[in-house]
Structure formats: structure tokens, C-alpha cells
Image (cartoon, grey):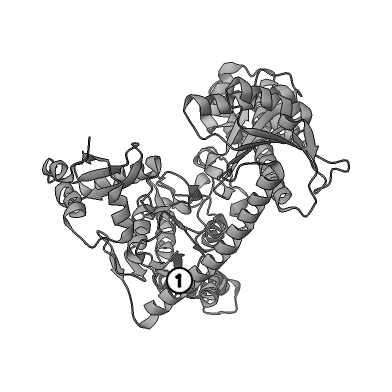
Amino acid sequence: MVFDPKRFVAGLPNLPGVYRMLAAGGEALYVGKARDLKKRVASYFQKHGHSPRIEMMLTQVASMEVTATRSEGEALLLENNLIKSLAPRYNILFRDDKSYPYLMVSGHPYPRLGFHRGAKDRKHRYFGPFPHAYAVRESIQLLQRVFRLRTCEDTVFENRSRPCLLHQIQRCTAPCTGKIAPEPYAEDVANAVLFLEGREDDVIKGLTEKMQRAAERAALRAGGDLSRPGARARPRAGAPIRRIESRRGRRRGRLRDRARHCLRQPGDDPRRRHVGDRSFFPANAEGAEPAEVIAAFLEQHYLEQPMPGLVIASEAVEIENVQVVTPSHGERRVWLDMARKNALLAIAQHVRDRATQEGRLNALREALGLPEGAQRVECFDISHTMGEATVASCVVYDRQQMQKSEYRRFNIRGVTPGDDYGAMRQALERRYARVTAEAGKVPDLVLIDGGKGQVGVARAVLADLGLHQVCVVGVAKGAERKPGTEQLIIESEARSLELAPTHPGLHLIQAIRDEAHRFAIVGHRARRGKARTTSMLNEIPGIGAKRRQALIEHFGGLRGVQAAAIDDIAKVAGISRPLAERIYRHLHESAAA
């Protein structure tokens, strides 16, 4: 049946919602949102003078689907979810697998400073996003020196009987043991929040006045003699302020560079520091206007991020509830020029990187006889310690880069310890049984960190699942186990291949193999550490399942038990003082061993 745009538009409601343009095969061409579905969809077929890109898209539309929503905001959320799941050919997409780190001030009666990445809880306050974890941790260290707020987990805070080392080195006021009353601690928290909001001048002014009054009181107690010890309190207390001022003097100019635009966060002072930048590269943007690219980025990037109060952009765009300006002169123009310069540098580096990756991938295709379109590589590695806590890793290389969001780990169970063949078989079966069942992405090449035995196992598993077309190659260490001497085991052709140490294809294999090895080791160490801590509790005489569970629930986990003092452990129901001493001694002696 031929698609009739006029008839379709006539049946649409004047409601907010999302529309999907579909090709003859049912694949999504474009997903869009609308304040008024009828007017927005009609505009595609009633207007002339569309860009060549849109004209090309309209010639391929075989059908359309719409979903009405209760509000435009709900339509935005649905549009974003559909774009992620359908990956339409004509939507401009920005992919970045990393979630940004934030600095968190918790909603606890005695709030803590913390590093946060991931979903947010409304009861806490978040400041950021920061470009990398180091910037968050550096900020936490600065706030600790100045405001002395706690950073310990709530489970540790609630079970301490004496101040920790941070209190001794004057990095925490020890609210856990009542060393500071709620009111002055709340004042410190408020000042820290002001500082994070960019109001350093208000903070410094308030602290200066407070220290001045403290110095005057100390001078009176010292009988007016400023040379006496009590009168020297102000210079010592003023050191944190000088640290703030020196940092401000070294780091003027706060900037958030994002692709082709510059952002200013709510409440930012122009004197604040530049904490870093990150570049994004759109997909499906060929032929799109610059304003369209920027609008797509802002809507996608800030759907799950706090929207800034002001956006400085190189193109005029309209975003609901946000002021977007395109300055022609002044300080804002300087920021925009800086963003543009960084964007040009990022583009140049991106082109160089893509050329390198493309060259490596082409060389690998040629060496292994892979088809021209082959680009997805999945690599497996096994990690264990003498058969203990075996973990298999699977890392993915696709679209000329590592796809970290698609990495997977497999905790191996039910296999004889040290049986690498059995572990590899289980990992591959779990991975590709699911891929086959869910019609997932099938790799063009599977790399196995191992020799003929592991490769044979991999080939058998894939054959049983009907994936005969997948090329399987083992990466075996050379005679001297040095990089560049690897033997490539090509099972389907019953041959091995040794590429030159300078071969670009070998460099790509080494990078993917090393990433699989790293990812497996991280998972193995985490599993081994958890297993050993659990076994330590199991080995303590007098600790059965109920007491073990009571300890874990009371301290919020095994690490909390390890961090607890004897007095804290003795507070748990069913744990006597002698048993608490035995638990403490066993855990710490085992850790030392």
C-alpha cells in the first residue's frame, strides 16, 4: 500500500507527541518530537525548500507512526529513548559511553562529601558535571582542607566510637563522635555549598569576618598582647583562605567546552576555574545545518544533566527554558572563540585518530582475509589465581573504537578450578547463546587470548550455535613472550600466522587483547577479594549464618565490618565483647597476612 501523507496528516491530533518515519523495510528513518503532531508532520509535506538531506529522507518514507503524550517534556523523553533504541538513519546522534562524575553533598543530618557517578537521588545535592574523576577528587580535597566536612560512608559514620585519622590531621571535625555540634557543622556545609555554586567571595568574606572576631576575642583573653599564643589563632585559621585565594589567582576563567559551543553553568563567576573539556562527534549529521547539530546536542546531552542557565553558542538556536546567546564581542565572545579553537583542534586530532584506526583495521582485514565491511571484533580472556575466582572477559571493538558500554564479564561456576578450556567454553556459550536468542550483533572476528586448544573450543561453540561464518583467531604468546612475537592461530584454515612487529594489524590486535586482559583482571581481583573476605567471616569460631548476616546488615557490607572498631562490633545483636575482639583480631590478622 502506497503511503498517502495527506490522508495520514488528516487523522493526526493537535497534541504533543513523537512521530517516526519508516522505510519500506520497516527500519526507522527519523524520530522527532512535536508540540503539535498535526502541524509538525504536515510541515514536512506542505512546505518546499527543504535541505537536500531532508528531501532525500522524504523520498524514502513508506509509512509513519505516532505516539501522543501528555506534554512536550514527556515527548522529549520518549524521543530520546526511541533514538537510542532505533538509531534512525537521519537523526543526528551524539554517542559518549562515559557518564560524567559529580561531587555530591548528601542529604544526611551531617552531610558528607562524596564522588558520584550514575543515577541521582533527589535527597542529595550534586555539583558538576566534572570532565574527569581527578577534578572531583581534587575539589573534595580542597573542601576538606577548608571546611573539614566528613567523607566517610554512612555505615562507617554511624558506628564509630572514636575519631578517625582525618580528624587528627584536621581534615574533618568528627561529627561521628560529637566533636562538633549540628549548628556549626551545618554552617560549614552551607559555606561549602556556596563555594561550589561559585560564590567564593561570599564565603571568603564570611570566614574572614568570623576569623577576625575570633582573633579579637583571643587577643582580649591574652590581655591585649598579640604576641601571646592565644592571639595567634587568626593567622593559623587564615591559611585555608589564602589557599583558596592562591588557587583562584592561578586558575582564572571557568569554561565548559562542548563540541561547537561554550557553556556557562548557573551561578558561574567568570573568574572561576577551567576544569576541563570534552569533545563530541555527531553521527548521521551529513548535510545538516550547524544550528540543527547544536540543538540536537543540547537536547540529548542535557536530558539527564542539569541544564545550565546560559548557553553561549556559535549558532542561534531555541531551547525551552534556556537562554542561548551568540555574542559578537566582549568576554563572552572570547569564550566562544576559545571553544571554537578547541573544537578545531579536536576535529584535527579525531581525523588523525580515525585515519590511524582505519589503517590498522584495513591491514588486519587484509592479513586475515576478512571481507571489506568487517569491523566488529570481540575478544575473550580468562583470569584466575591458581583456579580461584575465575572470571572471563569480553571486550568489543566496533566503529573503529573500543565500545566500553558493550563489555561483559562472566563469573565462571561449575568448572574444575584451573580448567581454562571449560571456562572459555562457558563464557562463549553464555555470550553467544544470548546473542543468537535476541538477534544481537554478531561479530566479524572473535579473538581468543590463547592457543590451539582455546581456539578449538571457541570454534566448536560457535558452530553449535550456527555461527559458522564468524572468523575465530587465537592470539598465542611467542617463544619469548614479548610483544611483537605473537602467533595468530587461524583454526578454520589450520594454520598460524606471525605478523611483523611493526604491522598495523598486529598493533590493533595487541590493543584489543590487552584491553580484554585488563578487564578480566579487574573483575577477577574484585571477585577474589569478596570471596576471601566472606571466607574470613566463615572461618571465625562462633560465627554462624545468623550472626554473619547480622554483621553484614548492621555495617552495610563486608568492608564496613572490616573498618569497624571492637566497640562498634560489640553493639551488634548477638555479638559479645569477647566475640567482637575475636572477630576484630581475625579480620585484621588475616588482612595483614
Q: Quadrant of residue 190?
A: bottom left
Q: Residue 127 at what x, y percent from top left?
A: 42, 56
Q: Nearer the viewer, residue 287 or 149?
A: 287
Q: Residue 95 at what x, y percent from top left?
A: 46, 51
Can residue 582 be seen in the rendering of this structure?
A: no
Q: Residue 368 at what x, y percent from top left?
A: 70, 42
Report the amino acid beneath label 1.
Answer: Ala
The residue that mark 1 highlights is: 339
Which quadrant holds the C terminus?
top right
Q: Residue 348 at what x, y percent from top left?
A: 55, 67
Q: Quadrant of residue 479?
A: top right
Residue found 57% across the figure and 28% down from its top? 431
Q: Quadrant of residue 472?
A: top right
Is the residue 33 above or below the residue 536 in the image? below
Can residue 93 be seen in the rendering of this structure?
A: yes
Residue found 77% across the figure and 26% down from its top? 453
Left or right placement of residue 38 versus residue 299 in this view:
left
